[in-house]
Image (spheres, grey):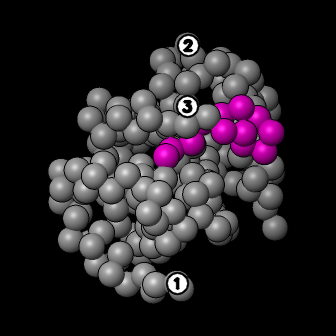
Amino acid sequence: MVDSLAIATLVIAALSRSGVPHVVVGSFARNFHAFPRSTKDADIVLAVDAPGLAQFESELGRDFSLDPQTTFETNTGTFRHTLVHKETEFKTELFLLSQDAFDQERFRRRQAFLFNGIASFVLTAEDVIITKLRWLRSKDVDDVRDVVAVKGAKLDWNYIHHWAAIHGTRAKLDEIRAGIPKID
């Protein structure tokens, strides 16, 4: 079994040593705001140029391979690199910070936290919800439900509704919220 937390910690530590501004997104961010679930990969957004990416890659060492070819993510209009831990084949998707208004805003709002003892940044609960609504795969719907169920009234609903309206996901958000049972 792959120890995804240990591998992701190595990646976060290399980002920290290389000084690359970043934010943990995806299931690791979701796990920070709700009860943990397993994951097949890690997702991180980087604000980096080519020299910074090269510095980060050198900090990783020989246990990882970074695909030099960027791919385009059609859902959010961002570019990404795939990083693979050679021994386990665990993947980390490194999304490059785009000019998309929401991508910029969620990066600006990121919150500091300790990722397994390493200083890092994670999306806010609200931005996890908005991001997951944008992707809207079945596991993303489950993730939205879980974060809303755990955070509930603590969430900034005006902010969430603003972005859900812009992305056209407000109806889906309302449907998910209506399906969450009330706990007395």
Q: Nearer the viewer, mark 3 or mark 2?
A: 3
Give the labeled residue for mark 3: 22
Marks 3 and 2 sit apart, C-alpha to C-alpha, by: 15 Å
Q: Residues within 10 Å of mark 2 (few under 14, many from 20)?
A: few
Residue type at mark 3? His
Where's residue 158, x and y in %?
28, 52
Q: Look at 55% across and 13% down and name the residue there.
A: 51
Q: Nearer the viewer, residue 57 or 149?
A: 149
Q: At 18% across and 56% down in the image, what residue appears?
A: 165
Looking at the image, tell me whether mark 2 or mark 1 is earlier in sequence order. Answer: 2
Q: Amino acid at mark 2?
A: Pro
Secondary structure mostly seen in magenta is strand
Residue found 61% across the figure and 47% down from its top: 92
CB under 8 Å between callouts 2 and 1?
A: no
Q: Is residue 8 above or below residue 169?
A: above
Q: Is residue 176 left or right of residue 125?
A: left
Relative image position of residue 149 (x, y in whole percent) = 50, 72
Residue at disc 3, secondary structure: strand
- Is residue 105 visible to us here? yes
Q: Identify the residue position indicated by label 1 in the image.
A: 183
Please provide the residue range marked out in magenta. Answer: 113-124
Q: Compared to 171, does 111 lie above or below?
A: above
Residue 116 image-quadrant placement: top right
- Tell me the kind of residue under disc 1: Ile
Residue under numbered circle 2 = 51
Q: Residue lying farthest top? A: 51
Badge number at residue 46: none
Of the image marks 1 and 3, the number of the one nearer the N terminus: 3
Residue 82 location, x and y as percent? 55, 43
Q: In this rendering, would 183 be left or right of 169?
A: right
